[in-house]
Amino acid sequence: MPYPGPINNHEGATGLLIRSLKVNNYYLMVDDFSINQKQDIEINQNFIQGGPGAAISNIGAKRFEGSLTCPLRVDRNGNLDPAVKELLKHAENPMTALRIDTNHVASHYGLTAGSVPTINNELLSLDCVLIKNLKINCSPDDEYAKLTADFVGMIDVRTSLGYVAPSDATYLKRALSWLDLDAYREESQMRSLSGFSINIENQSETHAFLMPISTTVAQRNDQVQFIGVKGTKWTGEMNEVMRRGLELHQHIHGGWMVNENLTFKLGKLQITFHHPLFNISDVPLSAKILKRTTSWTKIQAPNEPMTAGGLFTFNE
């Protein structure tokens, strides 16, 4: 039956709509998602010819910043979620195209200073995205293996879109967990591993150029013009339970370990660090079970972040 009063015409946002995304046109259900448009707007309190006061406004470029969290899910054949694969491949190779469609990118595409900023908002496709930070966590205490990504994006082509919703009713997949993990390296089968995290960091530069007023109005906007990648870094950290008398020769004393091939397998997803540069393992003393923590950074070839397969491989 309809609700009484004015609530009859109200359609509340459901969790299914809020958690619905499309990554390069692949549907993804996330656990947590946040995205907001950012624009630095300042008032210069300078003395000018007309007298002191807030006379000059400085309106910067529009950009989108956000984050998402989702499990690493597989279908009945054990294949990784296609949308998650797109996120992993882009984080590894940030030169590839990444598009995110959501129900939250309501933007005014034109100049903020050239129109009333609270009208003419559109639901637009975020068609130029860079993942700034991607992290994979997995431990016995976690319910599932979790992926977290922070990203920055812009609207390159003014493309309107409809609401994102599941494309079929059989979207039923299983989240990978600690039971799906296999880890090893050159000197150890790592059977005492008690948790690990993988992190990819892409440093970005966002530039904007305000077109001169002599051009047509349709070409004038204050969107970011392009996103540049000026550096990448692949790191990780793992915890291992110490076993008396068994860890003497496997204690990582730091440095470059050639052909170490530190490998983590989560289902059909394989993460391989061929040449990790280790920090010295940290073993804190406590009354509890001793766990040593080891962190590392991958030594990258100059062209490695511009090709696929340097870190992630999918055995499908």
Image (cartoon, helix red, strand yellow):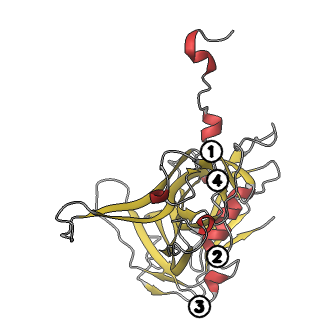
Q: CA distance from mark 4 to mark 1?
A: 9 Å
Q: Which residue position is annotated with label 4?
A: 124
Task: Report if residue 117 is visible in the image.
Answer: yes
Find out whether the residues at labels 2 and 3 contact each other: C-beta distance under 8 Å.
no
Left or right: residue 160 compared with residue 117 = right
Does 221 appear above or below 70?
below
* Amino acid type, callout 1: Asn
Along the horizontal axis of the image, is 102 left or right of 255? right
Q: Nearer the viewer, mark 3 or mark 1?
A: 1
Hey, which quadrant is residue 265 in on the image?
bottom right
Q: Identify the residue under disc 3.
A: 302
Label 1, label 2: how far apart the Cα atoms are: 26 Å
Residue depicted at x 19% and y 61%: 53
Residue identifier under label 1: 103
Give, as a three-letter code, the residue at label 3. Answer: Pro
x, y (%) of residue 250? 48, 77
Give the CA separation, mark 3 to mark 1.
38 Å
Q: Quadrant of the N terminus?
A: top right
Upstream in the sequence, badge 4 or badge 1? 1
- The disc at residue 263 is none
- First in residue order: circle 4 vs circle 3: 4
Circles 4 and 2, Cβ within 8 Å, touching? The answer is no
> Can you tell which of label 1 and label 2 is closer to the viewer?
1
Can I make out residue 263 in this image?
no
Along the line of sight, the residue nearer the viewer: 96 or 211? 211
Q: Position of residue 60 (x, y in %)?
A: 42, 66
The disc, 3 or 1, on the residue closer to the chain's N-terminal end is 1
Can you give x and y, in whole percent of width and height, for residue 9 in the image?
Answer: 62, 20
Residue on which the image places disc 2: 93
